[in-house]
Amino acid sequence: MSTRLSQLFVRTLREDPVDAEVASHRLLVRAGYIRRQAPGIYAWLPLGLKVKRKIEAIIREEMEAAGAQEVHFPGLLPREPYETTGRWTEYGDNLFRLTDRKGADYLLAPTHEEVFTLLVKDLYSSYKDLPLSIYQIQDKYRDEARSRGGLLRGREFTMKDAYSFDYTDAGLDLSYQAQRDAYERIFARLGLEYVIVKADAGAMGGSRSEEFLHPTPVGEDTFVRTDGGYAANVEAFTTVVPDALPVDGLPEARVFDSPNTPTIQTLVDLANAEQPRADRPWTAADTLKNVVLALVNLDGTRELVVVGLPGDREVDLKRVEVAFAPAEVEAAGESDFAKYPLLVKGYIGPWSSVGPVLGTESSSGIRYLLDPRVVDGTQWITGANVDQKHVLGLVAGRDFVGDGVVEASDVRVGDPAPDGSGSVELARGMEIGHVFQLGRKYAEALGLKVLDENGKQVTVTMGSYGIGVTRVLAVIAESTNDGKGLLWPAEVSPFDVHVVAAGKEPVVWETAEALVTALEGKGKDVLFDDRPKVSPGVKFGDAELLGVPLIVIVGRGAVDGNVELWDRRTNERTPYTVAELVEVLSK
Amino acid sequence: MSTRLSQLFVRTLREDPVDAEVASHRLLVRAGYIRRQAPGIYAWLPLGLKVKRKIEAIIREEMEAAGAQEVHFPGLLPREPYETTGRWTEYGDNLFRLTDRKGADYLLAPTHEEVFTLLVKDLYSSYKDLPLSIYQIQDKYRDEARSRGGLLRGREFTMKDAYSFDYTDAGLDLSYQAQRDAYERIFARLGLEYVIVKADAGAMGGSRSEEFLHPTPVGEDTFVRTDGGYAANVEAFTTVVPDALPVDGLPEARVFDSPNTPTIQTLVDLANAEQPRADRPWTAADTLKNVVLALVNLDGTRELVVVGLPGDREVDLKRVEVAFAPAEVEAAGESDFAKYPLLVKGYIGPWSSVGPVLGTESSSGIRYLLDPRVVDGTQWITGANVDQKHVLGLVAGRDFVGDGVVEASDVRVGDPAPDGSGSVELARGMEIGHVFQLGRKYAEALGLKVLDENGKQVTVTMGSYGIGVTRVLAVIAESTNDGKGLLWPAEVSPFDVHVVAAGKEPVVWETAEALVTALEGKGKDVLFDDRPKVSPGVKFGDAELLGVPLIVIVGRGAVDGNVELWDRRTNERTPYTVAELVEVLSK
């Protein structure tokens, strides 16, 4: 096959699109692969569509190899199943909702767990029908508050979503592993570096959950890893809990005046002046910072919680949100404090669900949750719940207890990994795949049961497995481009070879035509820049922009039967005779 | 390739779905090809998806052969371009509309003329870039008042829509012809009978327009044809206009009392008793029936028109709607008559835009339009616009003229075709394709111009070409099934061969396995019914239902190395040895 550039529906642009922040976005638009239709919504031009199809073909092959069967669901779905599982509401503003002419509610599906579950319920009824894995490659919709990066986070995007159905936990483990293995093969074939990180299942429910992250500075996710093989996104990272300490013999807590302590260091200095610890001076890590957070529930109601954490840490709202999902979490504001005069701003101390530990005792109903590091026997400098007073030597487990533990602190370089594999480093990544053990959440909500070997009804256990196809395309473009243009891996390049006729001499054109025909004969898909009135310089620039990794330049050397192979990746140009080149490219 | 039925995600149903009126709908659901998600919205199971993909592949091949390049647009599009062309409003309730989180209006696209036009405007600027034909295969949405027939008329459906761009009318003719030829090849390859009928461009605007109709009793469209090659849908049929007759010497019109004339025949009898025509008695075709219609405009306003047509004809609202598009047309109701006391129900006569020709003269503003048969010199019996009075011998062109002509009458068997090819017969058909010359309507509205050879800006002229992919699938199922089950043409069958292991003997299973392997080796895609505990009878029933046209039965004859080839189309069963069969099927 060959395509003449003079006939191809494409135009390259000299200028970057004004809304483009990342290289893949800039280059995919400039090279004429995609065009914006609305924020986060793109049309696919022939070149873009070719690359997308190649990625989809690889995914399909590996899905079939993993025993998954392809189906296809509508993008427009009725409200009811999503109402049953609660996601009609949980998705909040991220869901595109609409009403038909009869007033029935519909949504543009952001993901399809509900209807896959119902389809299996419709067709299957026995353990003999399982395991089953089915998938689709389909366009999904999320009304993102901030779509960004072109295809990196769109409002309409293509996903491969697969779902597995088993009737035992062991079966789910096998189905999960089969998809996980397929993902490794897919990303390897796409030449895409990835890290598999532990992830929190979050709003999706379920137990085991891992993300495939592509490490990239433009990534939206921060993840942690150790040399010892541990990897997790920050939401899923769990703090190593120190051993509890003996309480006996510790000195009594002591309240002291602490005006003018605007920073933790000034407070620590004052405490050391007041009374150092028996074993060593106080440090910032010995202060207990009590932060008031507001949970915003789906129904709009607001609940306050107080979180106690070491003063040398910051609250990581993303990590906290995992604990309180599906509520959103934000710092408490002035109006929250106004409603709770018990909260003495700047001097908040430990708390319990019935009120402050120190200061005015009174039932507040505000929960008090502690960082996992605040184990029994640890001694703290903290607020006294009274204006301009702190307390030192307050002992966890003796003087106060929390209503629970929460992973609220930020994760830092050097923190120990929970698996003992060493201390973590931080990196940024882009999620390109996600494998979930959903468990029985959806099957339970929607009544998907089968008869087991003993004729007993058992609820099916499910997995959900997603790859963002359009995002993967953008991530490949992001990770392979060289600034001058796109630079596709051979597996997904829109063409195998890009032949440039660079010169006006008849021999150039004859040689180019003959070369194209010869390469076609070898089964190559060739893009032929046959534009008659375009200068070689412009053609080379366009070739770089379009990103086919192998370019053949047919120039004046054609007089002697010579052409040049330009390897975009190494930027080397190697002369060949036409016959040699056809031989080399056919390998 | 082969697929084991025991592993395939499918379940056949004994019962017809309750909402199914047509065979294709019943069978596609019962055979496990599709499942309903909402009215007119379906999910595709593996078998259905395979057939759909094969149809799409044929369409793609022929589009590429016709020089059309594939692109892909989103289903979710912003309001603005559709606002500019007026279709945001014109589509009325058929359009799914929604609002995003920021309050911006979007639609689920029912067709994509606007955005294709804008994309070409974005990329191209010179006549040298044209002609261009681009297409997509994409899911579209129409909120049909009554979705029906399963996939025949869905609310979400897959279409191939192509658009051509030229800068001369002659160019458009060529582009149009290339698509039309491709359609002929596509439907021939799909084994689908079709008639190309003249169609009215209707709400799409433009000039030349033809529909590809598949003749079928379940079709929604009525079309007319002659043995001489004329074919048109009833909306596009044009009446043969008789020659005008001399007015001189015709007797004067005469008003007569006409109470108790509930039918046209009683009126004709009374007129003949009163005064027959000079040449012959009056007949029903000599009565002029004046029908009051209400045009409901897009903005909801209502306008009345009076249409005069021969009394032996009925008004065909579909034909009238073409004349008044985009307004909808309905019979005037009591409240309409109440507002216009000039309209004497049962005695309405000719009219003019300034009021009735007879009776009380007064300006009404109601337009009076005539059937094309009402030529000058024709004599009529008609209402006198006075209660209980008619008039006879009222001469068109002498006593009354209309404000215009309208094709309002129904078309009947025996009516002469406008091309002189004989008298028409009526048939029902299902639209499977449509080719339109849009002309400059969209390019003008959206400002798509190019520079011509003389450096002058010229507006581009466009064509629009659609095939309903999912509807085509249903029409194939409708036209090929034999009542017992689906019966696919080989080109789109989900499998080449369906092998049934019919028996418990080990030799049956060994032979079946060997046969499947041998057929796979010959490049055949085999469905193998390997279900161990299912009786041969049930397997045969399922094989009939699933619709693979060639079935191989491996039964007890396997002991002697014999199997049977069951041709579903002829229902013949032919014995072969395994080796012979592999040979026969490899041809």
Image (tube, coloured by chain):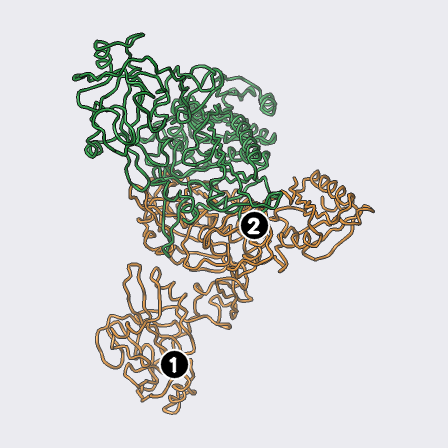
Chain colours: A orange, B green
Chain under label 2?
Answer: A
- Taking the view exactly as shown, the residue that stands out farthest to the bottom is A273
Frontmost residue, A178 versus A473: A473
Which mark is nearer the camera, 2 or 1?
A: 2
* Residue identifier under label 2: A33
Vertical arrangement, residue B457 with respect to residue A213, above or below: above
Vertical arrangement, residue A298 with respect to residue B363, above or below: below
Q: Residue at x 58, y 22 (%)?
A: B581
User: Can I make out residue A453 in this image?
Assistant: no
Q: Residue at x 76, y 53 (%)?
A: A574
Q: Is residue B304 left or right of residue A149?
A: left
Residue B279 at x, y percent in the picture: 32, 7
- How packed mark 1 is, by other alpha carbons closer than 10 Å (few <14, some 14-19, many 20 or more), is many
Residue A15 at x, y percent in the picture: 58, 58
Frontmost residue, A471 versus B44: A471
Identify the image quadrant of the C terminus of chain A: top right
N-term-proximal mark, 2 vs 1: 2
- Taking the view exactly as shown, the residue that stands out farthest to the right is A560
Frontmost residue, B213 versus A474: B213
Vertical arrangement, residue B122 with respect to residue B150, above or below: below
Q: Disc number at residue B132? A: none
Q: Disc number at residue A287? A: 1
Amino acid type, callout 1 = Thr
Identify the image quadrant of the N terminus of chain A: top right
What is the CA distance from the residue labelled 2 to the residue labelled 1?
Answer: 55 Å
Amino acid type, callout 2 = Tyr
Q: In the rendered image, which quarter is residue B432 located in?
A: top left
Q: Is residue A346 left or right of residue B183?
A: left
Q: Residue at x 49, y 17 (%)?
A: B570
Vertical arrangement, residue A196 with respect to residue B568, above or below: below
Q: Secondary structure at mark 1?
A: strand
Residue A509 at x, y percent in the picture: 75, 43
